Image: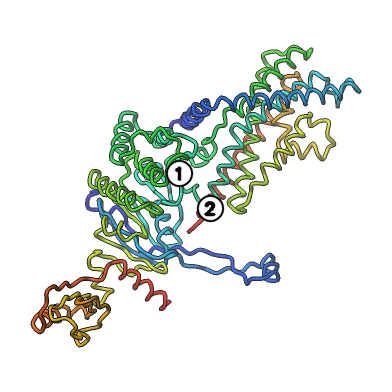
Amino acid sequence: MAQREPDIHVADLRKTFRVPEREGGLRAALRSLAHREYRDVDAVAGISFDIAPGEVVGFLGPNGAGKTTTLKMLSGLLHPTSGAVAVLGRAPARREPSFLRQITLVMGNRNQLQWDLPVLDSFEMNRAIYRIPPEEFRRTRDELVDLLDFGDLVRTPVRNLSLGERMKAEIAGALLHRPRVLFLDEPTIGLDVTMQKRIRTFIAEYNRRHEATVLLTSHYMADIAALCRRVVVIHHGEILYDGQLSALGDQFEAVKTISVTLGDGGTDLSVYGEVTARDGATVTLKVPRADASRVAATLLRDHVVSDLTIEDTPVEDVIERVFAREATRA
Amino acid sequence: MREPLRPLRLAWTFFRISALNELQYRVNFFLQLVQSLVAVATALAVLALVFSHTAQLGGWSRDELLAVLGVHILMGGVIRAVIQPNMQRLIDDVRQGTLDYALTKPADAQLLASTREFRIWQGVDVLVGAVVLAVAAVRVEAAVGIWSALGFAVALLLGAILVYCFWLALTIGAFWIVRMEFIVELFDGVYQAGRWPVTIYPGWLRIGFTFLVPIAFAVTLPAEGVTGRLDGATLAGAAAFTAALLAFTRWLWRTGLRRYAGASA
């Protein structure tokens, strides 16, 4: 039955915060002491999606889009203002121990390991909290330490670890109880490229081995591109896009990029499309998506072409443009 | 599946891990020991000074006040080893939003927040206090029987719980007011007053030290146990008050959690 049901079900989910509001200045500050004015802010304004077991979904959006608020509602930290949310068939906000034992939350910018203790001791504390049987605990711990290439660092106090090592330890500690659902909020923030890659590979491997469901937010498109086939794009608390990462461009980007290197050189190609760059004999053109193949064929027919590529706009650029467009509209 | 002893087991695991770690830093033990001994010496000098002028203070003899001093040091050790570090960490967690982690764990969040930190070397005061108390018990003329020993133990436990409740109630304030660091100094200042039995203070102060800041319960009551002044009715009253305060802080904790929405949304 669990196989058919989605692991995460969200329907018309809303979270409204009441924030005190006042003008700057002393007079306004004094006035607000007596009479506070509030403004309702919709952090999440009616979103719906389902995530199937074993799926890895990227959750994209600029700062303040409502990603973290959604993750907090999914992990039981915040009560929704309205709408439905179910994770593994439970209401997260009830925070039932049997539910909490099956999920994990990792926040890249916040530590949960004991600062002064060796990593192994923090793991031991988690073992006690999650009541993991000793044999299973040892097995999982060794597997995670091995997968993350952590080695002897487990004996080092957390405060003596580098940022990247600490993140590895955080992630290992958060997975000791083998959760079925992982909420990862910026797990690679601040890490160097090699370490980002390492964490990424690890998440993919964990997902493969344990068929865990992963909802991941990241500002690094490389993370998303490497891990998630599906993305949910959220902005101003609303979902802008939910679907294949590869199809994101189709919906939001109306152009393709053609790079052409000409044998005859120097020709003006602006009749074929917008020329965005010219580097010696290589010219870069932007053409409407639907016209791309026709333009390419025409170029090949009319010119001596030594090289030609048609490319989708990089996802980063698409996303950036989506958010920029939405921001000006808002 | 209810396991009544599970909270204790969890607390014990946390205690064991922190204790084993701190045992490595043996120099801290000697530093703390020196500090404790200096504090005791100072307190004894003050006591000697007071009793060079009088034979009794508010009905308490010199040896009885020694018992009060012993309990004061002992309870101070418990506070600094267990209660204060955990509450400090809770305040930090609320400010940094890391309390989120405690709330996503399948264990009681209040228990987790109250047992994560142990400063074992701060507990040296517990030993020093116990020694002072033992000396006082030998010198007090009323024989310390099994019942007064038991009464003392119960009063000490109730006192520790009350101090914990008091701290927790203040700390929960951090859910509303983010800057709460000042309460550490505030408490330390008031706790110093507990070096003397609360009965020597004027009425209004005595009431304050009993019900607002539970110094009377934390220090004077256990000392009364040692000196054979504690009666069953007082102890029962203390137990009832402790139970009520425990229930109140539990309620306050839940209310605070509802208020808590993490440092960033």
Residue at x-position 29% and y-position 62%: A231
Q: Quadrant of residue B105?
A: top left
Classify the position of the N terminus of chain B by image quarter: top left
- The amino acid beneath tag 1 is Gln
Farthest residue, direction bottom: A271
Circle 1 marks a residue in which chain?
A
In this view, the residue in front, A82 or A286, is: A286
For image coordinates 28% across by 74% down, the residue present is: A252
User: Residue tagged by mark 2?
Assistant: B260
- List the residue tagged with mark 1: A112
Q: Residues within 10 Å of mark 2 (few under 14, many from 20)?
A: some
Image coords of residue B259 (percent x, y): 55, 54
Q: Is residue B197 visible?
A: yes
Q: In which image quadrant can residue B123 be found?
A: top right
Q: CA distance from mark 1 to mark 2?
A: 18 Å
Question: Which SS class for mark 1?
Answer: loop
Towards the viewer: A151 or A31: A151
Q: Is residue A319 left or right of residue B69?
A: left
Compared with B8, A167 (above or below) is below
> Is residue B5 rendered to the left or right of residue B84?
left
Residue displayed at 25% across by 44% down: A210
